[in-house]
Amino acid sequence: MQPFAPSGVPSRGRFTLPTEAGKDDLVLDLAAKWGADTIRDSDGTELSPSLTALGFDIFSTVLLTRADQEFVRAHPEFLIRKFFRSDPVTAESDTVVLVPMSGFDARKYRIDTLNDPATWWEVHDRSTGNKVPGSQWQFDAAAGTVTVSGIEPWHQYTVNFLVEQIWDSTSMHNHLTNGWTCDPIMSVDPWHPACYEHLMRWFDRWLEEHRATTVVRLTTLCYHFPIDSGADGKTRYFDGQGYADTVSIPALLEFEKIHGYRPTSEDFVDEGYYRNTHRVPTPRLREWMEHIHRFVVRFGRDLTDRIHGAGKKAAIFWGDHWIGMEPYLPSFQDMGIDIHINACEGGVVARRCGEAPGHQVKELRLYPYLFPDTFNDHGGQPLHDSQLFWANVRRGLLRAPVDRIGYGGYLSLADRFPEFVSQVTGLAQEFRTLIEVTKSTRSWRVPVKVGILNAWGACRSWIPMEGRDQKFAVPYSENMFLLARSYLLECLAGLPVDVAFLSFDEVIAHGIPGDLDVLINDGDAGTAQSGGHYWLQPEVVAAVRKFVHQGGGFIGVREPSAQAAMGRVFQLADVLGVDQELGQSPSQRPVAEWQENRDHFILGGEVLDLNFGVTHSYVAPVEPGVQVLATAPGGHVLASARDCGPGRAVYFAGLPATLDNYRVLLRSLVWVSRKEESLAQWFASNPKTECAWYPEVGKLVVVNNSPDAQVTTVLDGDGRAFEVSLAPYASAWFSPEN
Amino acid sequence: MQPFAPSGVPSRGRFTLPTEAGKDDLVLDLAAKWGADTIRDSDGTELSPSLTALGFDIFSTVLLTRADQEFVRAHPEFLIRKFFRSDPVTAESDTVVLVPMSGFDARKYRIDTLNDPATWWEVHDRSTGNKVPGSQWQFDAAAGTVTVSGIEPWHQYTVNFLVEQIWDSTSMHNHLTNGWTCDPIMSVDPWHPACYEHLMRWFDRWLEEHRATTVVRLTTLCYHFPIDSGADGKTRYFDGQGYADTVSIPALLEFEKIHGYRPTSEDFVDEGYYRNTHRVPTPRLREWMEHIHRFVVRFGRDLTDRIHGAGKKAAIFWGDHWIGMEPYLPSFQDMGIDIHINACEGGVVARRCGEAPGHQVKELRLYPYLFPDTFNDHGGQPLHDSQLFWANVRRGLLRAPVDRIGYGGYLSLADRFPEFVSQVTGLAQEFRTLIEVTKSTRSWRVPVKVGILNAWGACRSWIPMEGRDQKFAVPYSENMFLLARSYLLECLAGLPVDVAFLSFDEVIAHGIPGDLDVLINDGDAGTAQSGGHYWLQPEVVAAVRKFVHQGGGFIGVREPSAQAAMGRVFQLADVLGVDQELGQSPSQRPVAEWQENRDHFILGGEVLDLNFGVTHSYVAPVEPGVQVLATAPGGHVLASARDCGPGRAVYFAGLPATLDNYRVLLRSLVWVSRKEESLAQWFASNPKTECAWYPEVGKLVVVNNSPDAQVTTVLDGDGRAFEVSLAPYASAWFSPEN
């Protein structure tokens, strides 16, 4: 291979710049430095006429459900609602008084007295799980209390109650985090036909008023993801993918007509877990999601039809009010979206965006956002963060390219950090070079197709779930991806393998797809990621067992196939060769004979720093012949590997996103599928580096993912080695010898 | 207080010495040094006639069920039996062949073909939990295989099968560990009437032949605790309290007549967990235990009647074949035992023995046993171990004295370690001094009565259950008690508090006893110690909640009240103020407001080195006002405290047995019961030291539990302070000023 210097790459294009009111010179300066071809008004700003005249493509943001505050104030019946569970209260006698709003932010929520509490609310004895009959409780609207009588002393009681949301979550966030001082904004629920009609009329008018706009950026559609605020204004619950804020009375009534049952408050409240994305989804949640999705698609289509009718393009942002869009479901395509934007800080989102189905233009809104949380003089490190994020984003782009990048926030903040400005100049050009040189073609893969097996499957493709470590995140210093015990998806996002997301329901219905070489199950026991009760369905266990016994590979991480029953914790302990001890039989050692093998292929090559994210896995060998690759003091197994007939299985106690773990995972994937030889080509020896070969254009790029200079030995397609030296975070292009 | 030098304490007595064949001089030498008044034959040795003539009390060991090997060989139908579950095998078609004995030691177990497999065995599909109908499987005795047909491919199958035990567990242990070379010994099942009769006749003869014997040491009675040996001869399962080796066909048939149902093989096999003591006991297990206990008491009584008839005393050893004795059950007293012996390495067993109900003479068999596992030249540290064990045993004795101590094993091994011999000389005299000075009276307590709440209650008093850490024990260097995340009982054993053991069933039936000040729940989630499903019984949660709300104290350790349901993991999260995150809602922070308070009373005084045994508790504050005393990186709560109305609650992620934790627990007990002022008397400030005041004799002893010299400030009964200096592990006596 010969070094290749890409030439003729334009220094402008594929870049969206936010604008800032009254800073036209700065906008023009940074647009030139970063090569912006498009400018946009950020949330809360408007483009100045002098800028709109300068020949940029113009993205204009519209936030329809929170656009017309006058209308909201006139129609509180259209406010978006939600169900809360009050904090449990101990009954000290046979009567207890609950104060539903206690613990919730009264600036954001107001008890809904329009819809009859007797119809919509529920009181529960949370010590038995039983619902308290309506005859035993009464709501006093004036006092804001619920009195429950005829109950058991020393049990705990809650009321599920309905609130109106009187402050939009994003608006509140901007007030509290970014110092906004405008009036709190409220959002409406477009499911009310009169509200829907008003929004469409408002939007028609808006389109007429924005003739210079070339792209309408819908930020976003109908329903926000839940950010519940406590009495202290702080977040008490958060779910980036959750449907807890889709509570709409007309939607509930319509659902009842279709499905024959009406979801109860408890369906949403879910014991206080609010059916969050980490929970194994129930059939009732899935039905509700479909119901909301169908509506959101219709709403979105009504908007895009209008946008296209006005000769403009429609962009959608995967954030804020995105709930119900479901970009990985086929019907998302019915919405007619042209440009698909994701906020992105690493490989997972880059790959999620790049691989999202459909022919939309894909755009990444890069981190750090130009906001005061990073761009400040008290510890913010814009340059450091941007370098780190970009290195991870780039990994994803090598496997799944997108079309555009951009930023959001305040240019005046960025302008105070010239090293950051300069670094973005570089990464913007690096991005344009990648896309122009490769012509967005597909990079070479090792011949291993990976299936991520969880309860969600495709509709939650590339949604990271760090699991319970998320609550105990150590503030990051060097690498935000190191927060969690396992961030396997981030490791995987940059690897040269094809990845599919597979749900247990699909396995039950159709078995394991024939094109998969490796199945991965990674998660905390009992969660949607690990699978919980699905592992007690014999069809699931039998399907995976058959897959492995017939030559497939299985990689289990954290608590794979975990659901304690029938003498096992890991239901696939027989396949993995290891099982977890929960304290049911700590003096049981079912199998004594096993080998310790630190020289295993998986830990081979130049891998140096092993980190499995945990010391106490409580996992021990249980099948003969399992090879233990790493342990913690006491014999906690951290990594193991096993032949299982013609198939193979690997276990990791955790897999934090470290550069070495990117390599450990790649080696595991080829080992477990018996394709070790595939690392003899298009491979960079140094785990701090990676490479991507683009066969359709005959070009190779080698990247340094680390903040230090690196030397790496690269193998070409014939296995011939050559050495490459790379500056920190640098990349270099090569093409075959003539 | 004035130093007090005990005088007139005899230098002989309260000490039982093992003998060794052909080493009479050594026996006499050590008997003199250690002040032995009693000699005994150890398992496998016989007393020499020259020794029996020397005026010692003579303990003679009889191991009745393994005494007459000729009889066993003639009557294999009387061999003790047990049920095993074969290791699970994956069916690769609709037929699978199981080899029951695969993985088990054929020297120890033999398939029982006398009792019809069709009647007694069971085959299970362990992927569904279902039993396979008898028509679908067949046992081939010649091949030693079970063929199962008409089954589901890729499920796993097991057979529960019956074996005869052809090598007694203790005999095998002595062969493998202590190099014994005699023939393997077999044990019989005395439940067979003809066997019972034979044993009684044999025993009558034995009594006649042992006229010099003054005490018959029954080592022990009918049924051994389970030590299952794998094909490699190593232990694959162990349960010091388990009933898995009480499988007796006549006992099963008799049980059926009484209870109307016959326990199945699966009752014993229990999915492969063999109903071990860490599991929450089932009603069927309890019924079986009572059935066995009734028989063992009758058997024991038949022996003690004969012993007393021969003018001798009866001693029992809590070990080996002790299963069914149940010394903490009232009917144990019906057995007529005179001397009660426990093998003891720390405070827990010392206190278990000292507080065992009944007026038996209590004797501790001290560790280290004089066996080659410690008395060797390759790393064994007899002196170190003995000092450490004695310091812990002594703690227990300060709160619950016993009458005698002694050793087991080979004197010739001890003789090679003169420092050990000298140290035992000292501890024997220290023991005699303690008993003589205090006249075995009760030492002063702080006015706090503690109830240990678990699924077993009193019948498993002072049985330590380290939980799942037991499987991952790090080889000890300094302190064997540091192995486990929590060894709360060892901390508690030496504290000046009264302790009762309380079962959930008792709480359900009778509520919390009125004399308790503090309840402790300490264990891994789902185990007998924590309580598992009992925490979903509203009566249990309500009773504890009421107890605390009315002024009681609650201390939860490890995973207290843990059983995920109804929006909680810790069902008493409302009382504790903290809850555990299992991954169901990692972005939920129900309560933000809490205080960090490292200056809390509980961590006050001279406590220095905090060690809560774990870094990842996954426990976070959930109630307002909870005080967090210690956290690990990420915010994992390791210790917290909370006012709960007039009551108080404390949480510890773990409580390993460290000297500082002894103190932390004491401070917690008085804090949680609002009796902090009780530490203003009879208190030694330095946590490496403790003291005990004996009001009935007006004497105070101060002990140094550490291997270093210590200075400590001691408060007398009026709170007056005086300083005490103590050599390593030393003790010192004081009496009030004249």
Image (tube, coloured by chain):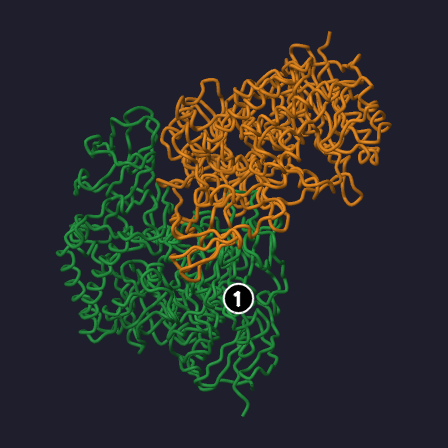
Chain colours: A green, B orange
Chain under label 1? Answer: A
Q: Position of residue B736 (x, y in %)?
A: 71, 11
Residue extending furthest bottom? A738
Q: Amino acid at mark 1?
A: Ser
User: Foreground residue, A53 or A114?
Assistant: A114
Q: Is residue A196 above or below residue A633?
A: below
| Most foreground residue, B390 or A63 | B390
Q: Tell me where residue B499 appears, x and y as whole percent.
A: 55, 23
Query: Could you tell me which secondary element the residue under label 1 belongs to?
Result: helix
The residue at 37%/47% (across/down) is: A235
Frontmost residue, A295 versus B556? B556
Q: Quadrant of residue B441?
A: top right
Q: Is residue A27 left or right of residue B347?
A: left
The residue tagged 1 is A668
From this viewpoint, is residue B108 visible?
A: yes
Q: Residues within 10 Å of mark 1 (few under 14, many from 20)?
A: many
**As rendered, which of A206 and A605 lies closer to the eye?**
A605
